[in-house]
Amino acid sequence: MINIQDRIVRYGELRPCKTAFIDAHTPGSDQKENFTIIGGGVSESPDQHVHIADQIGFNIGAAGQPPRVRNSLHDHNTAEVFFVLKGKWRFFWGRWGNAGEVTLEEGDIFNIPTGIFRGFENIGTDYGMIMAVLGGNDAGGGVHWAPQVIEDAADHGLILGENGVLYDSKTGDTLPRNVSPKQVMTDEELAQRAEPTTADVLPNHVARYWDMMSLSDKQPAKVIGAHALLKDRPGFEVDFLSQNSISCDMETVDQNTVLMPMRGHWRLRFDGDEEILNPGDTCLIKVGEPHSIEPSMTGEASLYRIRSTDDAAGLTGL
């Protein structure tokens, strides 16, 4: 018998890492917190805690930031999708972060194209949280920083080795003899990065919460996928479920599935057990495991459901 508690990561029990990335000492970014919820994650720090280490075809993480704290410009080899759990966030992109931008509020989702530098900032008045889905099992091998991020970090004592590990001179770390510092991208590599405008990105990569609530009135709204609202094949598909779009019948899935409540409280029945999932909780259901999920009370209820697909690369483009 499977203990469902081993498959649920509660929002209140998330363990942050404040030294996960190269900008951990850079003013304006030094108060952010990163979370690895399912999978290996993308951290450059050995201090990062992994809540569920299972490889399921994609990674689940999160970022928490006080107001006016930002995550520096970076890129990934694979897809990166965010939805806003708490607060108001500005996402920006391009070599210098000025090619385009979009503001997202609670429940909105952003399927960020690969091949562009991107960053994000909490522009709300309280601590904010965004949840992340990254394509592939090995999301840690593909973080690329804009050159100025690496240079600023070195000025504040953090050096990223070519082995992908951070070394903090403030704590006495030095690069091992056989490890060189990570080199900044060449002009040729930088020229390959796209500079899309907001008009290029917004129509095909952003979905708004209340639009998805309307679309999920009778059935789950397909948000990301080959035939979804945001047509893409990033190695996973994303559905949006609300009060009237889901059956309470038991079902057995043929893909690894993650349930992430956005609003309301959801009753999960699994292997003879029953649990309530709350906003910010994350639950893993594996292939072949019968379960049911339904709102536990009337009122507003919404939930993101992520399922692995056979798309090999986990890429997403313009």
Image (spheres, rainbow, N blue to C red):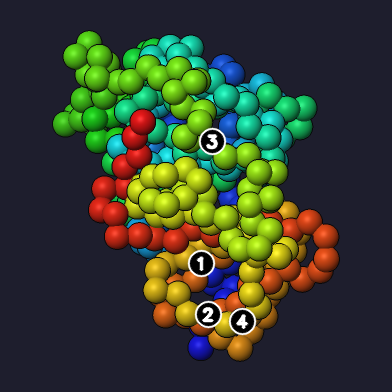
Place of residue 272 in the rendered image (x, y in percent of width and height, measured from the top left): 61, 88
Q: Is residue 13 above or below residue 43?
A: below
**Residue named by callout 4:** 249
Residue type indicated by callout 1: Leu
Front in this rendered view, residue 122 or 305? 305
Circle 3 crowding by C-alpha within 10 Å: few under 14, some 14–19, many from 20: many
Q: Mark 3 vs mark 2: which is more N-terminal? A: 3
Q: Mark 4 vs mark 3: which is more N-terminal? A: 3
Q: Are marks 3 and 1 in contact (CB under 8 Å)?
A: no
Which quarter of the rendering shows the C terminus? Answer: top left
The secondary element bearing badge 4 is classed as loop
Q: Are marks 4 and 2 in contact (CB under 8 Å)?
A: yes
The secondary element bearing badge 3 is classed as strand
**Foreground: disc 3 or disc 1:** 3
**Residue named by callout 1:** 284
The secondary element bearing badge 2 is classed as strand
**Foreground: disc 4 or disc 1:** 4
Q: Mark 2 vs mark 1: which is more N-terminal? A: 2
Which numbered circle lies on residue 152? Answer: none
Q: Mark 4 vs mark 1: which is more N-terminal? A: 4
Left or right: 115 with respect to 45? left
Place of residue 103 in the rendered image (x, y in percent of width and height, measured from the top left): 62, 26
Distance CA(mark 4)–CA(mark 3) = 31 Å
Front in this rendered view, residue 193 or 37? 193
Residue type indicated by callout 3: Val
**Residue named by callout 2:** 251
Q: Mark 3 vs mark 1: which is more N-terminal? A: 3
Instruction: Give the quarter of the image for residue 121.
Output: top right
Front in this rendered view, residue 194 or 219? 219
